[in-house]
């Protein structure tokens, strides 16, 4: 019997999924549906962003409604560096992670002193400030945003959608694996213990604040990486990436997918963006349908989509 | 900079703050008493504005239109409470966020289907179309003055109801300790439904009063919702008095800084720097205010729970 805090990553399932994702561009080009390669990259980038929020929200129990700030800051870091002639992905992407993580550390330092709803609101307030900061940077496009002349330079040709797809897939796979190792490490156990009972964890002698801040910082850095990727995917960064509705959307993805499930962020991001894509093909009023579906999930599946898998696993065990 | 300009912006701020109070009052009661994060509160405000525009066009009277909007939105609130919100009591905040976010999508798209994507116009009543001369040489919109008066009247009425009446006592009891109020025999379900309908009617009032000043369009609820949340957090969740103080603070600080800060900056620094910095800082100031309040008073200015 394994601890409920242990988050299993089935090696066979993960490898099969990875193999399917690796073969996907071949299938898409064979059927002359290259459009879907770009869409899949977008899905995976949002999956990465949602996974980073799930680390903070699901495992760390910190309900941050300002995650778009780190996502957008990562994107802007890449775009601004490129504006000044620094094209290399090997410089710009780590810089995006570092800047976002630093921002998360600063915001966390103040926000983590508050609790509950007040924490939700204070993270939102900071994110709004970052949003208005980028709106006001007229040198970098202000309201209209900044377009990138080309993708970051990696040393190999990343201009085709297929090449970029593999870069995104690699980074997503590493991130999910990293989160898996992290939540099952000593650090991850402590963070989950804090989520379950902060006072008790403190009483045992753990420096609760430092653990939460570290978790918050890692989540911010990962969101920065997702931002760097979305800048390269869209070839455009705009303040929209930092708008509070973007934070809300990321949060909805995590809740829909499954809070505190390893694949919760991935499932939620893919489900929402795919639904959006499919429904918008049928009707211009796709938001209505999406709203009704989300409402149905809340009423019928309180723990999100990923809980379906766990229910099945539990049935098989018994 | 002359004094009349400051006075004018101050009055605008007061007017905006009072309208924020109408939204925040409903939000803080729903939040404080029912413990539900209702993101769809802004959608009720939007629905109120749309109803007001429609009924005004039908009856040719702004007053009948507003009355119709109040009733229709209250009914909508009751339907919403019975069908969705009631199932969210006792659920965690995250489920409430997801469910009410879904409601925003449904309301926005529903409004687009019913009324189209173009903004509607709602005209101020003709009796209030002319500006009035408050001071010699100082003209101010009579409609905005009317809004200030209406907002103050509602605030006083609400204060009286909450502090002096039996219904208000039930509401306050619910806000400070829900379980105890239930144990003392309060029909909490009925209180909740009425409260939600009342909050919806306040939203409709704000929507129809602000309709002639702002555009009646899809998405109008989301931009003001965040400010309403800022207001109730500054004031302390569940506190009507806090909502009033917070709303006036936010309304006045936001309006004054947006209009005056760029002017001040222009005097202090080069024009191009001022043009960048002024509006950005002005937009941030409300959030700085909120963070500062939470830093010193983590429960807001007037915490409802002891």
Image: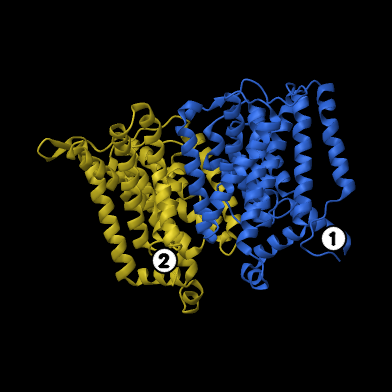
Chain colours: A blue, B yellow
Residue that appears at 51% across and 40% down: B108
Residue at 22% from the left image edge and 44% from the top image edge? B145
State the residue at coordinates (28%, 65%).
B160
A286 and A75: which is toward the camera: A75
Image height of A62 relative to A32, above or below: below
Residue closest to the eye, B35 or A165:
A165
Name the chain letter of the residue that bears numbered label 1: A
Is A254 placed left or right of B178 in the picture? right
Quadrant showing the C terminus of chain A: bottom right
Place of residue A40 in the rendered image (x, y in percent of width and height, measured from the top left): 74, 32
Within 10 Å of the Cα at label 1, are there few (<14), some (14-19), or many (20+) other Cα atoms? Answer: few
> Would residue B160 appear left or right of A172 to someone viewing this image?
left
Q: Secondary structure at mark 1?
A: helix
Q: Which mark is residue B303?
A: 2
Tell me residue A166's x, y (percent): 79, 31
- Where is mark 1, residue-wise? A315
Q: Is residue A229 something one can see in this rendering?
A: no
Residue A117's disc is none
Q: Position of residue A97 (x, y in %)?
A: 65, 40
Which of discs 1 and 2 lies nearer the camera? The answer is 2
Q: Are marks 1 and 2 on the same chain?
A: no
Location of residue A247 (image quadrant) = top right
Where residue A176 appears, as percent x and y from the top left, is: 76, 45
**Residue at left offset 36%, top offset 68%:** B168
* Callout 2 crowding tier (Cα within 10 Å): few <14, some 14–19, many ≥20: some
- Marks 1 and 2 sit apart, C-alpha to C-alpha, by 46 Å
Observer-nearest of B271 and A50: B271
Give whichever of A129, B157 is nearer the camera.
A129
């Amino acid at each position: 019997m394994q601890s409920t805090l242990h988050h299993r990553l089935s090696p066979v399932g993960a490898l099969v999924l990875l193999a399917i994702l690796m073969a996907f561009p071949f299938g898409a080009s064979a059927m002359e549906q290259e459009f879907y390669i770009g869409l899949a990259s977008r899905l995976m980038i949002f999956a990465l962003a949602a996974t980073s929020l799930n680390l903070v929200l699901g495992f760390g129990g910190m309900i941050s409604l300002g995650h778009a700030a780190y996502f957008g800051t990562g994107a802007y870091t890449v775009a601004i560096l490129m504006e000044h002639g620094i094209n290399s992905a090997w410089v710009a992407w780590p810089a995006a992670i570092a800047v976002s993580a630093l921002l998360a550390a600063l915001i966390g330092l103040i926000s983590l002193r508050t609790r509950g709803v007040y924490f939700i609101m204070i993270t939102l307030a900071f994110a709004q400030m970052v949003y208005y900061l980028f709106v006001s940077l007229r040198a970098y496009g202000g309201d209209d945003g900044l377009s990138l002349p080309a993708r970051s330079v990696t040393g190999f040709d990343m201009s085709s959608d297929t090449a970029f797809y593999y870069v995104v897939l690699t980074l997503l796979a590493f991130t999910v694996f990293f989160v898996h190792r992290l939540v099952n490490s000593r650090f991850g156990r402590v963070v989950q213990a804090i989520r379950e009972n902060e006072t008790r964890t403190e009483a045992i002698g753990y420096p609760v604040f430092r653990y939460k801040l570290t978790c918050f910082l890692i989540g911010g850095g990962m969101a920065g990486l997702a931002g760097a990727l979305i800048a390269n995917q869209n070839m455009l960064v705009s303040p929209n990436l930092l708008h509070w509705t973007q934070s809300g959307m990321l949060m909805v993805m995590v809740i829909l997918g499954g809070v505190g499930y390893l694949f919760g962020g991935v499932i939620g991001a893919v489900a929402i963006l795919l639904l959006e894509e499919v429904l918008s093909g049928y009707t211009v009023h796709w938001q209505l349908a999406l709203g009704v579906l989300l409402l149905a999930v809340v009423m019928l599946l309180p723990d999100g989509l990923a809980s379906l898998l766990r229910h099945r696993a539990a049935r098989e065990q018994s | 900079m002359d004094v009349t300009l400051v006075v004018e912006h101050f009055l605008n701020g007061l007017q905006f703050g009072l309208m924020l109070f109408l939204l925040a009052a409903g939000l803080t009661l729903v939040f404080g008493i029912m413990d539900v994060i209702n993101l769809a509160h802004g959608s009720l405000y939007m629905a109120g504005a749309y109803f007001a525009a429609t009924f005004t066009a039908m009856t040719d009277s702004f007053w009948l239109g507003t009355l119709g909007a109040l009733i229709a939105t209250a009914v909508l609130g009751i339907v919403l409470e019975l069908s969705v919100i009631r199932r969210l009591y006792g659920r965690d905040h995250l489920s409430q966020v997801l469910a009410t976010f879904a409601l925003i999508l449904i309301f926005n798209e529903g409004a687009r289907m019913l009324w189209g994507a173009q903004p509607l116009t709602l005209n101020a009543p003709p009796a209030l179309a002319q500006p009035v001369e408050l001071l010699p040489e100082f003209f101010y919109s009579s409609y905005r003055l009317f809004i200030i008066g209406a907002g103050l009247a509602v605030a006083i009425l609400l204060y009286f109801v909450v502090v002096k009446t039996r219904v208000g006592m039930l509401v306050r009891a619910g806000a400070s300790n829900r379980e105890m109020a239930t144990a003392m025999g309060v029909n909490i379900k009925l209180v909740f439904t009425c409260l939600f309908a009342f909050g919806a009617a306040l939203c409709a009032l704000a929507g129809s009063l602000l309709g002639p000043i702002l555009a009646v369009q899809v998405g109008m609820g989301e931009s003001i919702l965040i400010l309403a949340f800022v207001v109730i957090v500054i004031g302390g969740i569940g506190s009507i008095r806090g909502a009033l103080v917070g709303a006036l603070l936010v309304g006045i600080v936001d309006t004054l800084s947006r209009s005056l800060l760029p002017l001040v900056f222009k005097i202090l620094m080069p024009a191009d720097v001022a043009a960048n910095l002024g509006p950005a800082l002005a937009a941030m100031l409300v959030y700085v205010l909120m963070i500062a309040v939470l830093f010193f008073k983590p429960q807001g200015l007037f915490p409802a729970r002891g």
